[in-house]
């Protein structure tokens, strides 16, 4: 039987900075980080141009097993992430705001920091 809809995300990219843990007003905790993913097949950047060659994607982990893994990461490490795309809403000083992020259900480190560091 085919699914009517699918929300699955699979990413491989480099950790841009140390993950950050946050406590929610409910008392729940989550860990957030950003993943820098190369745009495969992106056209070469023209001289002086601003064509993006990477995407920076917000990731969030609610599961304790995933959150524990994040404590060992350092910026620049290559990670493989599985999860679902979520849209989060909140009240900002200028009015309602929203952002898409990947709610991570599984992650593994697949490479060490490169000598060049974070892209």
Image (cartoon, grey):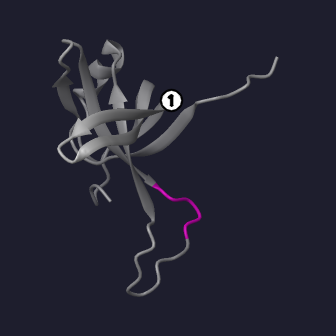
Question: Looking at the image, which is closer to me, 66 or 112?
Answer: 66
Residue 71 % position (x, y): 22, 26
Whether residue 60 is situated above or below residue 51 in the rendered picture? above
Q: Is residue 43 left or right of residue 17?
A: right
| The N terminus - image quarter | top right
Q: Please report the residue visible at 20 percent of the width from the left and 20 percent of the height from the top.
A: 24
Q: Is residue 35 left or right of residue 44?
A: left
The range drawn in magenta is 38-42
Please indicate, yes or no, whether residue 8 appears anywhere in the rendered image. yes
Q: Please report the residue visible at 28 percent of the width from the left and 60 percent of the height from the top.
A: 116
| The C terminus - image quarter | bottom left
Whether residue 6 is situated above or below residue 37 in the rendered picture? above
Where residue 5 sits, quadrant-wise, is top right
Most common SS among magenta residues: loop
Q: Residue furthest right?
A: 1
Q: Is residue 107 left or right of residue 40?
A: left
Please indicate, yes or no, whether residue 111 appears anywhere in the rendered image. no
Residue 25 % position (x, y): 17, 18
Per the image, the residue denoted by label 1 is: 84
Residue 109 % position (x, y): 39, 33
Where residue 105 sits, quadrant-wise, is top left
Picture mark count: 1
């Amino acid at each position: 039987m085919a699914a009517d809809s699918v929300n699955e995300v699979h990413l491989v990219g480099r950790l841009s900075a140390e993950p950050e843990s946050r406590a929610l007003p409910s008392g729940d905790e989550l860990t957030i980080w950003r993943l820098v993913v190369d745009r495969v097949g992106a056209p070469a950047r023209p001289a002086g141009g601003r064509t993006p060659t990477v995407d920076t994607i917000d990731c969030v982990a609610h599961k304790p097993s995933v959150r524990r893994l994040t404590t060992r990461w350092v910026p620049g490490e290559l990670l493989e992430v599985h999860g679902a795309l979520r849209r989060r809403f909140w009240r900002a000083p200028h009015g309602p705001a929203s952002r898409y992020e990947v709610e991570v259900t599984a992650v593994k480190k697949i490479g060490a920091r490169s000598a060049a560091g974070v892209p």
